[in-house]
Image (tube, rainbow, N blue to C red):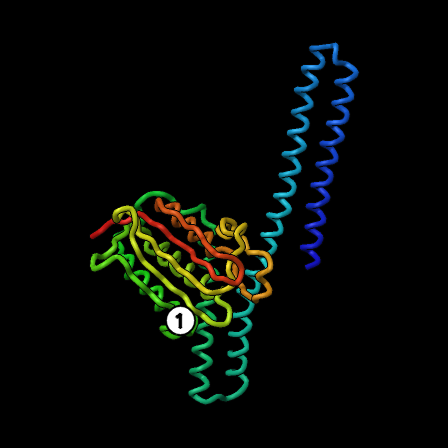
Amino acid sequence: MAKITSRRKAIAFFVVLGCSLVALAVALQVGWIILSWREGVKLFFGIIFFLAIIAGMILNTIFLVREIRRNEQHDSFINAVTHELKTPITSIRLYLETMQRRDVGEAQRQQFISLMLSDTDRLLRTVEQVLTAGESGYKRGKAHHVELDFEAVVRECLELARTRHHLDRGAIEFESAVGANSVTLNADPVGLRTAVSNLLDNAIKYSRDKVEISVRLETAEEGKLVILRVSDHGVGIPAPELKRIFKRFYRVPGRNSFKVKGTGLGLFIVRAFAKAHGGKAYAASEGEGRGATITLELPRKTA
């Protein structure tokens, strides 16, 4: 919290400094114009140089503020990743030390093994998120693309999410509006599964105590697009944040009160995948506490 306050003070300082310099430059220029308005050539070049100086100061202030905010996001990302890596490692170590120091029954041993496998899955997901986001970005092209049944991929990710988060079937409702025809996409299979899983994980994380998620698959533009909508009834998203949540490392301010952990990379990966495949990803919400809907649109090919 102290770091955030310090950065906000730094941002305020640079904004005030930049505005003060601009005001001072304007005052000096106006005074100079009044004193030398009869000398046309000097006046003309003076105005040109003045505008250049003003533009430079404004750009410099904007750059400094952006760099401070970017550093803040990077620090937040490092803290989040450290937590996501440290927590399961600590848990695994604790179970192993318990099994090493005393005899445990077979039932408890199996329980420990199951919990350690769950922790290793969490570690693997975190590493995969970081590696995926660390790439130069999804490249357009079809070198690694295959024909995929999108509905089958969604159902597979749904079952995985239910198992991973220990949810009953009613927690995530799935509705398909594509009819009997299969929806085939020519896409990167790993990227598609990662994008769908990230949408589900995001909805589950921000559902607070009770998970009630609706997943709907439909088509649009006379079958040219396939649309996946994932809706929750959780904390919601303020209107100014609807576009920012897809930025790398970005976390909505104030959500720490909901004790939601993460790297801030999930929705960034979703948007990167969508763009690389000629689609788009966007969010909608009626406001804080009223849930949110994240939509993934991709070009469709009907088998």
Residue placed most toward the observer, 65 or 181: 181
Residue placed most toward the observer, 164 or 14: 14
Residue placed most toward the observer, 237 or 107: 237
Left or right placement of residue 185 versus residue 215 in this view: left
Give the amino acid type for the residue marked by disc 1 in the picture. Ala
Query: What residue is rendered at 71% in x and 47% in y?
Result: 10
The image position of residue 137, as x and y in percent, is: 43, 46
Q: Quadrant of the N terminus?
A: bottom right
Mark 1 residue element: helix
The image position of residue 89, as x and y in percent, is: 53, 70
Answer whether residue 249 is visible to the viewer in this image: no
According to the picture, the residue beneath numbered tag 1 turns out to be 171
Q: Quadrant of residue 164?
A: bottom left
Query: What residue is rendered at 42% in x and 68% in y?
Result: 212
Q: For the residue carrying disc 1, how many other residues have a C-alpha within 10 Å: few (<14), some (14-19), or many (20+)?
A: some
The image position of residue 185, as x and y in percent, is: 28, 51
Answer whether residue 120 is visible to the viewer in this image: yes
Residue placed most toward the observer, 275 or 16: 16
Query: What residue is rendered at 71% in x and 36% in y?
Result: 19
The image position of residue 126, as x and y in percent, is: 48, 61
